Each structure stands twice: as structure tokens, then as C-alpha cells.
Amino acid sequence: QVRVVESGGGSVEAGGSLRLSCAASGYTYSSLCMGWFRQAPGKEREGVAALDRDGTTAYVASVKGRFTISKDNAKNTLDLQMNSLKPEDTAMYYCAARLENCWSWDRLLRQQYNYWGQGTQVTVSS
């Protein structure tokens, strides 16, 4: 069983930055494909970024060049650095994990992830 806990959400003005962290217990990060998802009110949950077991990353087009997913081995966390934030980035952000390689054709499909955190809120004001 993998337990996933997010932290680091908050409120920021447009153009600002936030860093989200995800702590996964039960397995080492090398055995997990992990991703960040977000869900705004009235919208479907969408994949934002993923980091596979071999280091391959994936990003949704709307965040490319602004968000970076990475592992912090010192803190044993999966981080999402979010820069140049926009009001449309406002959502509840969720960390998710999978105990195998992610689907190579689309690492951002939510159906392949087995373990989910409770989410952390990100609010970007204009």
C-alpha cells in the first residue's frame, strides 16, 4: 500500500510561484511512477505532470515551460515547481502514484494511477 500526502498549496497573485511537495510512504520512489493532477470546480480532473520510473517526464501543454516536476532525494519528495502562475491554474492539486511504469502513450491518464492523496488547494488571483 502506498500512502500519498501533498503539501505546499496556497494563494498567490498571477505571475507568482508556488512549490508543491508530495510524500509517498510504503515504497521507494524508484519503484513508482508519480504524477500531479488538478481539478477546478465544475471541471474534470486533468493530468498536469508525471515522472516515470526511468525519469521520463510528461506535461500537459498548458503548463509546459512554467511547471517542473522533480524528485527531491534529500527530502524524499516529489515536487512540482510552478512558476508564472495564471488564474486558470487555480484548482485542487492531487498527487498520485502507480506501482509500475506508466503507460508510455499517455502518462497523464488518471485511470492508470492507483494511489491518490487528499489534495492541496492552489489559488491564483488576477
Image (cartoon, helix red, strand yellow):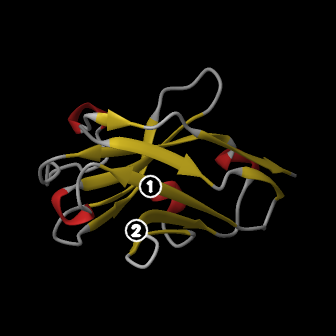
Classify residue 48 as left or right of residue 110. right
Q: Quadrant of residue 18?
A: bottom right
Label 1 to label 2, Cα distance in Å?
7 Å
Considering every residue shown, the one lying at the far bottom of the view is: 74
In this figure, what is the number of numbered marks? Answer: 2
Considering every residue shown, the one lying at the far top of the view is: 42
Check disc 2 and report the residue beneath it: 76
Write the residue at 12% across / 49% down.
100
Q: Residue 122: where, in percent of width, then height?
A: 69, 46
Question: Which of these two is toward me, 63 or 119?
Answer: 119
Label 1 sits on what residue type? Answer: Ala
* SS class, disc 1: strand
| Mark number, residue 108 | none
Check disc 1 and report the residue beneath it: 23
Question: Which of these two is toward me, 6 or 65?
Answer: 6
Write the residue at 70% across / 61% down.
85
> As displayed, is residue 19 above or below residue 108?
below
Considering every residue shown, the one lying at the far front of the view is: 26
Classify residue 86 as left or right of residue 30. right
Marks 1 & 2, CB-CB < 8 Å contact? yes
Q: Quadrant of residue 101?
A: bottom left
Q: Residue 109: where, in percent of width, then height?
A: 28, 39
Write the residue at 72% across / 68% down.
17
Instruction: Give the class, few, some or many, for how many residues have Cα within 10 Å of label 2's Cα (few <14, many ≥20).
Output: some
